[in-house]
Image: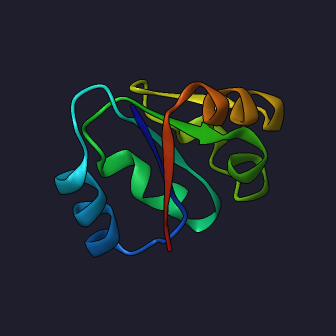
Protein backbone atom coordinates (compact mmCIF):
# COMPACT_ATOMS: atom_id res chain seq x y z
CA UNK A 1 0.00 0.00 0.00
CA UNK A 2 1.31 3.43 -0.97
CA UNK A 3 0.65 6.70 0.82
CA UNK A 4 0.27 9.53 -1.69
CA UNK A 5 0.92 12.85 0.04
CA UNK A 6 -0.66 15.56 -2.07
CA UNK A 7 1.02 18.89 -1.32
CA UNK A 8 0.61 20.70 -4.64
CA UNK A 9 -2.54 22.70 -5.40
CA UNK A 10 -2.13 21.70 -9.05
CA UNK A 11 -5.03 19.66 -10.48
CA UNK A 12 -2.58 18.09 -12.94
CA UNK A 13 -0.43 16.68 -10.12
CA UNK A 14 -3.49 15.25 -8.41
CA UNK A 15 -4.54 13.65 -11.69
CA UNK A 16 -1.07 12.09 -12.05
CA UNK A 17 -1.18 10.74 -8.51
CA UNK A 18 -4.65 9.30 -9.05
CA UNK A 19 -3.72 7.62 -12.30
CA UNK A 20 -0.65 5.98 -10.75
CA UNK A 21 -2.42 4.81 -7.62
CA UNK A 22 -3.73 1.34 -6.91
CA UNK A 23 -6.81 0.19 -5.06
CA UNK A 24 -6.08 0.35 -1.36
CA UNK A 25 -3.62 3.24 -1.61
CA UNK A 26 -4.03 6.09 0.84
CA UNK A 27 -4.24 9.80 -0.01
CA UNK A 28 -3.26 12.57 2.40
CA UNK A 29 -3.79 16.22 1.45
CA UNK A 30 -1.56 18.82 3.09
CA UNK A 31 -0.94 22.55 2.69
CA UNK A 32 -2.58 24.33 -0.23
CA UNK A 33 -3.55 20.98 -1.76
CA UNK A 34 -6.54 21.02 0.59
CA UNK A 35 -8.24 23.35 -1.90
CA UNK A 36 -8.42 20.35 -4.30
CA UNK A 37 -10.04 18.01 -1.82
CA UNK A 38 -13.71 18.91 -2.55
CA UNK A 39 -13.25 17.79 -6.16
CA UNK A 40 -11.53 14.50 -5.22
CA UNK A 41 -13.93 11.56 -5.52
CA UNK A 42 -12.02 8.96 -3.48
CA UNK A 43 -11.66 8.55 0.26
CA UNK A 44 -8.85 10.74 1.57
CA UNK A 45 -7.33 12.20 4.69
CA UNK A 46 -6.21 15.76 5.32
CA UNK A 47 -4.00 17.48 7.87
CA UNK A 48 -6.27 19.16 10.42
CA UNK A 49 -3.83 22.01 11.18
CA UNK A 50 -3.67 22.94 7.48
CA UNK A 51 -7.47 22.99 7.21
CA UNK A 52 -7.77 25.17 10.32
CA UNK A 53 -5.16 27.68 9.14
CA UNK A 54 -6.94 28.04 5.78
CA UNK A 55 -10.42 28.29 7.31
CA UNK A 56 -11.51 25.11 5.53
CA UNK A 57 -12.24 22.84 8.47
CA UNK A 58 -16.03 23.30 8.17
CA UNK A 59 -15.99 22.69 4.40
CA UNK A 60 -14.16 19.39 4.20
CA UNK A 61 -16.06 16.70 2.26
CA UNK A 62 -17.63 13.77 4.08
CA UNK A 63 -15.39 11.41 2.09
CA UNK A 64 -12.35 12.80 3.94
CA UNK A 65 -11.21 12.63 7.53
CA UNK A 66 -8.79 14.89 9.33
CA UNK A 67 -5.60 13.62 10.92
CA UNK A 68 -3.27 15.02 13.52
CA UNK A 69 0.47 15.05 13.02
CA UNK A 70 0.80 11.95 15.22
CA UNK A 71 -1.80 10.14 13.09
CA UNK A 72 0.10 11.21 9.96
CA UNK A 73 3.20 9.50 11.35
CA UNK A 74 1.20 6.33 12.11
CA UNK A 75 -0.29 6.38 8.61
CA UNK A 76 3.17 6.72 7.08
CA UNK A 77 4.48 3.80 9.13
CA UNK A 78 1.52 1.61 8.14
CA UNK A 79 2.21 2.03 4.40
CA UNK A 80 4.95 0.18 2.54
CA UNK A 81 6.01 3.28 0.62
CA UNK A 82 5.30 7.00 0.43
CA UNK A 83 5.14 9.32 -2.58
CA UNK A 84 4.94 13.08 -2.13
CA UNK A 85 3.44 15.07 -4.99
CA UNK A 86 4.80 18.64 -5.19
| Quadrant the N terminus occupies | top left
Judge left or right: residue 75 versus residue 6.
right
The correct choice, above or below, for 64 with respect to 2 in the image is: above
**Going by the picture, which residue comes out furthest to the front?**
80
Question: Which residue sits at x=49%, y=43%?
Answer: 81
Q: Residue at x 62, y 48 (%)?
A: 56
Position above or below: 72 against 31: above
> Most extreme residue toward the left, as rendered?
19
Q: Is residue 12 above or below residue 60?
A: below
Q: Is residue 47 above or below residue 13?
A: above
Camera-side residue: 24 or 44? 24
Q: 17 or 42: nearer the eye?
A: 17
Residue drawn at (76%, 47%), measured in percent from left and top? 52
How is the protein colored in the picture? rainbow
* Image location (x, y in percent) of residue 37: 42, 49
Q: Position of residue 30 (x, y in %)?
A: 61, 55
Total marks placed: 0
Q: Position of residue 10 (x, y in %)?
A: 38, 75
Residue 47 coordinates in the image, percent (x, y): 67, 43
Q: Horizontally, is 51 left or right of 16 in the view?
A: right
Residue name at image x 21 percent, y 54 percent: 20
Residue 76 quadrant: top right
Based on the displayed image, in which of its 4 quarters is residue 31 positioned? bottom right
Amino acid sequence: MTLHIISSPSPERLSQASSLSSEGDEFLFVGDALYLLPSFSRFARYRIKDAEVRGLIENMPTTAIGVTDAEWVELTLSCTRTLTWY
